[in-house]
Structure formats: C-alpha cells, structure tokens
Amino acid sequence: MNELLKRSSAITTIVFDMDGTVLNTLEDLTVSMNYVLSKFGMPEHKLEEYRLFFGNGVGEALRLSLPEGTSEDIIDEMLPVFKEHYDAHCLDKTGPYDGILDVMRELKLRGYKTAIVSNKIDSAVKELHQRFFGDSVDIAIGEQPGINRKPAPDMVNLALKELGSSKEESVYIGDSEVDFMTAENSGLPCISVLWGFRDKDYLIEKGAYCFAEKPQDIIDILISI
C-alpha cells in the first residue's frame, strides 16, 4: 500500500466518486449517447467503448464519441439533446453495485462521514443520492456554477468543508484516472475500485496504487490504516 495511505491516520471521512464507483450507470449512459449520435447521423458505439469515454463529464464523453474534427457548434447542439434523453432514462438500468449499499451502511455504523462528488449536474447527483443512498451518505455534490469540475479539487474541498473534515483525515475513492487525479489535486490518498469503468492495468499506468476488488475491500483497507 502506498506510503501516503500508510501515513494517513485517524481517517474519519470518505469521499466517493459516483459513476463507476457507487452506481453502475454505464448502460443508461450508453443508450442516451447512442440516441443522440443516431439523431445527428453519427456512428454509434458499443458499451465497452463508452467505458473509456466516460469519466470526465458528458461533454468530454461526447467529444470522444464523435468523428475527429466535429465542430464545437455541433457538440453544443447535441449536449442538450443528450441531457434531455438521459434525464428521462437515467434510472432505466442504473443502480448501486452489488455490495456497495452494505458498505455504505457499515461506514455509517462505524462513524465515518461520507460524501459523493460527481461531474454530473448537481440536481441529478442529489436526486440519485436520495434515491439510492439516503441517510447512508451525508452529502452529494455535482457540477454547479462557480465550482470547477473534477479533476480540479473544488468539489472535494466543498465536501470536506460541509462535513467539517480536514484533508489529513480523509480518503478519496473512485474508479478512473480522473478520480486518481482528483485525489492528488485535493491532497488525499486514493483507493481505486476495480468494478467500474477502468481495469487495473489501465489504472496502474495512470499511477494508481491502492485497489479494492470488491466493495467489502474498502472496509478492510480503512481499518488497516
């Protein structure tokens, strides 16, 4: 385990990414992205391709999905179409990963403070938080005016402020290189989960060092610190 994580003591606060970490959203994202691509006469993609496209917000995922050289004007037209479709279908297949709700409840019972931060729009993040996690997670923060998107540290900093926690007592958990960068930019150690949108080899290439293969591993790692 990385020395940074070893040196972290008295951990009280856990900050989670949402998509690919606590919620499996990939099927609904795939359907909505293919809907907008088809509507604009663009080639569609398979779910496994989208696994690498998502992680840095819808706008970037859309850019990666489009033929090279597609103008920003077209992207600006497509984004609201995607958002309208996704808003209507974001709960068709989406749900917590197996075992993650049990982990959230156990963290609560053990006295940890918890937050979810996501590059999704703030209203959607809060709705998903309430629908799936309720009182098991203290707060949820998404994209909103005046707050830079991940991998900037703004959302993490806001979450820690609202929870009354310091960086020294906090850990970040996510599934992608964007999450690893977010943790680094926030000055937090990072636990990378392996059930999400990226595989272990890819994450290692990006610098990840501490891994949870299943949700219960999160508890095991935390109590070993």
Image (tube, grey):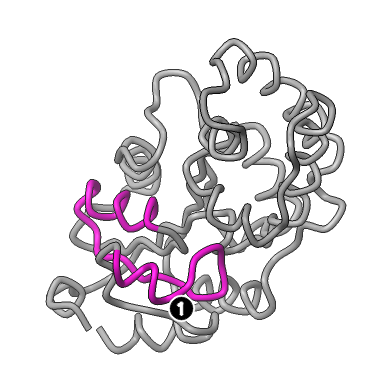
Where is residue 134? Give x, y as percent.
68, 56
Q: Secondary structure at mark 1?
A: loop
User: Toward which corner of the image does residue 121 lie, by quadrant?
Assistant: top right
User: Toward which corner of the image does residue 21 lie, by quadrant?
Assistant: bottom right
Q: Which residue is mark 1?
A: 110
Where is residue 157? Give x, y as percent.
31, 41
Q: Which residues fall within the magenta stretch? A: 177-205
In this view, 8 is above or below 126: below
Going by the numbered disc 1, the residue's amino acid type is: Arg
198 within the magenta span: yes
Q: Is residue 28 rendered to the left or right of residue 179?
A: right
Q: Quadrant of the N terminus?
A: bottom left
Q: Residue at x 12, y 77 (%)?
A: 3
Where is residue 78? Give x, y as percent.
70, 21
Where is residue 47? Give x, y as percent.
71, 58
In this view, 123 is above or below 206: above
